[in-house]
Amino acid sequence: MHRHGYVGRKFGRKRDERRALLKSLATSLVMQGKIETTLPKAKELVRYIEKVITKAKKGGLDNRRRVIAALGTHEAAYRLFDVIAPQLAGRKSGHVRVKRTTLRVGDGAQMATIAFVDKIADKPVKNDDVKQVPPTESAQTKGDKSK
């Protein structure tokens, strides 16, 4: 049997178990900034988390709800929106990096570390840098013209 058109790894799990695995790995990555797992799981997590980060960078209520659904916890989603996404605004893609580490002692599985490419500060980014546009025609100005 051919494998054309089949995308993604199965990890020997059923569909719901795979979704729960990716959701928990993504939540851990967002909350901790760096996690260690097996290489195939890390590679699959890159595909998953890149899409979630892109939605968080776009903003908006619909994307916020999708990120909450993708991560599973409100705390992780708020951290992604308020802390991580503004710091990754300069990148189009390639937000996370997978680095091979040691072989696991028990079964010899290749382990890998997945982390954000940029240094992530723990404090939320304030919108002080956003330029405030002064009002062009205020109500007082319009009132003065009518006199």
Image (cartoon, rainbow, N blue to C red):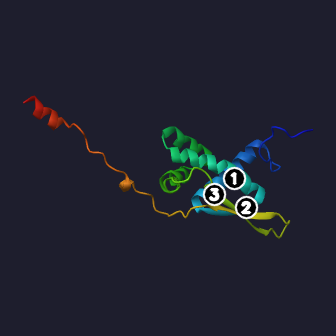
Disc 1/disc 2 C-alpha distance (Å): 10 Å
Of the residues under marks 3 and 2, which one precedes in the sequence?
A: 2
| Pointers 1 and 2 in contact (C-beta within 8 Å) | yes
Mark 3: few/some/many CA within 10 Å (<14, 14-19, 20+): many
Asked whether, in this view, residue 91 is left or right of residue 130, the answer is: right
Do the residues under discs 3 and 2 have CB atoms within 8 angstroms? no
Does the image show residue 72? no
Among numbered discs 1 and 2, the one appearing first in the sequence:
2
Q: In the shown orientation, is residue 48 left or right of residue 143? A: right
> What residue is drawn where x is 24% and y is 39%?
136
**How far is disc 3 from disc 2 in space, using C-alphas?**
14 Å
Can you tell which mark lies on residue 96?
Answer: 3
Residue linked to disc 1:
45
* Along the viewing direction, whichever of 146 and 73 lies nearer the viewer: 146
| Label 1 residue SS | helix
Q: Could you say which is closer to the camera, residue 115 or residue 27?
A: 115
Pointers 1 and 3 in contact (C-beta within 8 Å): yes
Q: Which mark is residue 37?
A: 2
Residue 1 placement: quadrant = top right
Q: Earlier in the sequence, mark 1 or mark 3?
A: 1
Please, what is the three-letter code of the amino acid marked with disc 1?
Leu
**Circle 1 residues within 10 Å: few <14, some 14–19, many ≥20:** many
